[in-house]
Amino acid sequence: MSTLLEVNGINVSFDGFKAINNLSFTIANKELRAIIGPNGAGKTTLLQI
């Protein structure tokens, strides 16, 4: 399968708080992924960037 989306080494911090630290993932064509986690885990931040 071909790669639809590839993310490597994403880092986001707010005043020293690391919302996302070294995130990497690959999504292939016709593949479904879910983003889960507790409040403050960086889910919304990931979607906004």
Image (cartoon, helix red, strand yellow):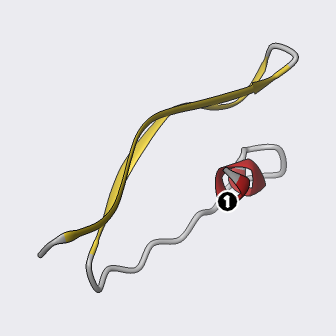
- Residue 13: image quadrant is top right
Residue drawn where x is 32% and y is 80% of the image: 31
The amino acid pointed to by label 1 is Leu
Decide: is 47 above or below 46: below
The image position of residue 38, as x and y in percent, is 76, 52
**Residue that extends furthest to the right in the rendered view of this protein:** 15
- Looking at the rendered structure, the number of numbered marks drawn on it comes to 1
- Residue 24: image quadrant is top left
Residue drawn where x is 59% and y is 63% of the image: 35
The image position of residue 36, as x and y in percent, is 63, 62
Residue drawn where x is 45% and y is 72% of the image: 33
In the rendered image, the quadrant that contains the N terminus is bottom left
Residue wearing tag 1: 47
Please indicate whether residue 22 sits to the left or right of residue 4 in the image. right
Residue drawn where x is 26% and y is 79% of the image: 29
Judge the density around disc 1: few (<14), some (14-19), many (≥20) Cα neighbours within 10 Å: few
Decide: is 49 above or below 47: above
- Residue 9: image quadrant is top left
Label 1's element? helix
The image position of residue 10, as x and y in percent, is 52, 35
